[in-house]
Every structure is written in C-alpha cells, then in structure tokens.
C-alpha cells in the first residue's frame, strides 16, 4: 500500500511544494481525463476497499472521509458524499469488479521508475440485461479514466504537464517504495444511486495523484444509462444551464461546508472557503458552463438519487491568494427547477416524470 499524506491534507493547501504555474498547467489537462477514457487490460482481483469521500472545507474547518451510507427508504442527501440506493428487487444482478495494481515499474512515456498504485472498483450488470456488454465496458472505462489517462495511454501533452509538476517538487520521490522516482495513483469507489428495470445511475469518486503527492485531486464521474436501449444520458442532454439550479447549488455548498466564524448563527459566502476564493458569481457561471471557471476548473455531471430525482454533481479546483481547494459536491434538482430546465429526453420517461 502507498504511504499517502494524512487524510485530506491536500484538500486545502496554503502554499505547497510545487508552483502555482505548474498546478495551472496540470489542471488545464484534467478535463480530458474527465470526459473520456481508453480501454484497460484485465487485471482484477476480488476484495473490498473503503469508500473515498472528499468534502469541501470551511476556512480552517474540517474535511473528512467515511464509509458509504445506505439511503434509508431512498432518501436523498446533498452533502458531497456517496450514498448507495441499490435496488435488489429487479430481474438482474449487479456485482463489483476491481482493477488493481501495486508496483514500481519503468514507464516508458515518463522515462522514469514510477510507483503505480491503483485500486479501482466498479459495478457490472448481469448478462440478462439486453445491453450488458456495452454497459459494462462503459462502467469500467469511466471508473478507470485516471488509469487510462496517466498510465495506460498518456498523451504527450499530459506527460509534459505531469513532468512539469514532478520536476518542480524536490520531494516527489519521498516515501515511495523501490527507489521510485515519481507516483501515479488512483483510488476509485462507486455507489449505485438509482436502478430500475429501465435505468441505472452510478457515481464514481476518484482520488488521484499525478507525479507527486503534492498534486492530488478528486473527481466525481457518473454514468446514467438506459438498460433497455443502451442510451447514455449526460447532463447537457437532459437539462439546460439554469441560473436557479446554480444558485441553489452554491447556497447548499455555503451552508453545509462553511463555518460560522462570526458566531452570529448565519453563514455567508465569505465564511465558505471555496466561494471565498472565487466569488459566488464566478462559481455560478462555471456551473452554467460560462466564464473563466467553466471547463477545467468547474465540471458538472448528472446522476439520479434513490428518490428518482436528478442531482447536479460538481467537481471543482479553485485557487486564490489564500490557497486552493479541490473537491466535489452535489445538490438535488427540485421538481420546480426541473420543470423550468428539462429538455426532451427518454430519461424522464424511464423515471416516470
């Protein structure tokens, strides 16, 4: 097992071993990883691994990780954590497969000895699902996107970005086994947040390190797929960029992750570290796909919760003078918001909406 820093020490970093320029270059390439992946070869073994949960923190507040929670009666929760709502009263079964690798090896693309540590879990549906093979490939590919992007088939551009971080971190090899010179690591867990005879929705939480422990990131990726037709539903396919949904997301993030520093019983934007770094307007614009944060800095996704409600998930990397934060959060889209923002899609038929 790897010797990563104390839990979530990197979630907010006020300084660091690598330059802000190197981090900007690295962040600029992350959207490639989140929006596509390449197939990986089989290397699974059975076993269990803890859920990885990353939560935003208030200024000086506490972050944390924890075990997945089962949704009692399918109750939703807007809290930046994975919640399983697996429905077993269906005609098919869902099992867990793994991709694991724990080895120091010479990786040709980087020209260095690399400690490769991957623990990736993902669901697989049984063969009685009409589109089982196609769906299972999609689930595996989505879970293994960090493995694909940084280890299996790194582009020349991505190699350059990772190596810029390694070259600037004098401690890049500290704590690595077998005289490794750099690190590639990804730990992925998942939750089936909704499933029926017609629809499957899965969230993947990824904690990954690219080159050095100083360059740790998180990502929320999702798969929403029609089990009968194989149609995949992305956020942009089913919802418009809606200001009200963006506002409610930021409201929830502020209230749940901020800290009442003034002791007045009210948490405002300035008391939420994440929003304090970039401002509410910029964050809301990023959620709607506009402004300087849209794309690599703020990336949105869709999943369905145990109540059959659409949820907005947001992965973000925000920096400012006082530091930077990396995390993800989620919020339920209300029926009123859905009515104003929905597009025509067979997803709503599958949900009975």
Image (cartoon, rainbow, N blue to C red):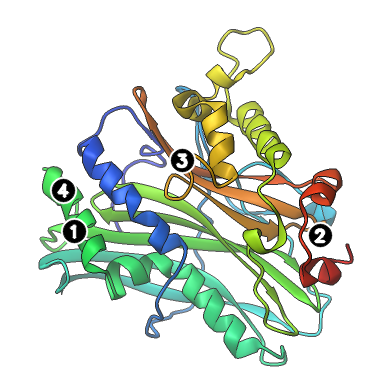
Q: In the picture shown, does residue 350 fall above or below 160?
A: below
Would you identify the image quadrant in which residue 344 lies? bottom right
- Sequence-wise, the earlier of marks 1 and 3 is 1
Q: What is the distance, in whole Å, between disc 4 and disc 1 at their CAs?
A: 21 Å
- Mark 1 or 3, closer to the camera: 3
Q: Are marks 2 and 1 in contact (CB under 8 Å)?
A: no
Give the image location of residue 166, x and y in percent.
Answer: 16, 51
- Sequence-wise, the earlier of marks 3 and 2 is 3
- Mark 4 or 3, closer to the camera: 3
Q: Which residue is mark 2?
A: 308
Q: Residue at x 69, y 52 (%)?
A: 240
Q: Which residue is mark 4?
A: 174
Kind of element beneath mark 4: loop
- Mark 4 or 2, closer to the camera: 2
Q: Tag on residue 304?
A: none
Q: Residue at x 68, y 67 (%)?
A: 201
- Mark 4 or 1, closer to the camera: 1
Label 1 crowd bin: few (<14), some (14–19), many (20+), radius 10 Å:
some
- Sequence-wise, the earlier of marks 4 and 3 is 4
Q: Tag on residue 293?
A: 3
């Amino acid at each position: 097992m790897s010797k990563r820093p104390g839990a979530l020490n990197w979630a907010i970093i006020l300084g660091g071993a690598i330059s802000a320029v190197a981090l900007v270059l690295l962040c600029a390439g992350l959207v490639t990883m989140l929006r596509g992946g390449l197939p990986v070869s089989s290397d699974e073994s059975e076993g269990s691994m803890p859920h990885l949960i990353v939560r935003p923190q208030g200024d000086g507040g506490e972050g944390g990780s924890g075990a997945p929670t089962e949704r009692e009666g399918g109750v939703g929760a807007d809290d930046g954590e994975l919640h399983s709502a697996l429905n077993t009263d269906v005609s098919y079964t869902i099992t867990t497969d793994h991709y694991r690798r724990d080895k120091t090896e010479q990786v040709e693309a980087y020209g260095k000895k690399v400690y490769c540590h991957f623990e990736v879990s993902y669901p697989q549906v049984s063969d009685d699902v009409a589109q089982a093979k196609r769906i299972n490939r999609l689930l595996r590919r989505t879970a293994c996107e960090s493995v694909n992007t940084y280890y299996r088939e790194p582009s020349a551009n991505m190699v350059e970005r990772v190596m810029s971080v390694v070259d600037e971190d004098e401690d890049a090899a500290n704590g690595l086994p077998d005289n490794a010179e750099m690190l590639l690591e990804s730990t992925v867990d998942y939750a089936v947040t909704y499933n029926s005879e017609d629809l499957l929705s899965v969230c993947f939480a990824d904690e990954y390190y690219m080159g050095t422990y100083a360059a740790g990131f998180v990502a929320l990726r999702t798969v929403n797929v029609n089990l009968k037709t194989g149609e995949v539903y992305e956020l942009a396919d089913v919802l418009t960029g809606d200001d009200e949904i963006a506002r409610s997301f930021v409201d929830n993030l502020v209230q749940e992750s901020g800290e009442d520093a003034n002791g007045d019983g009210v948490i405002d934007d300035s008391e939420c570290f994440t929003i304090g770094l970039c401002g509410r307007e910029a964050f809301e614009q990023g959620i709607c796909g506009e402004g300087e944060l849209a794309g690599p800095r703020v990336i949105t996704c869709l999943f369905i919760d145990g109540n059959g409600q659409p949820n907005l998930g947001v992965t973000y990397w925000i920096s400012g003078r006082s530091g930077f934060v990396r995390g993800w959060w989620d919020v339920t889209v209300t029926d009123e918001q859905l009515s104003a923002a929905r597009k025509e899609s067979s997803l709503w038929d599958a949900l009975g909406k």
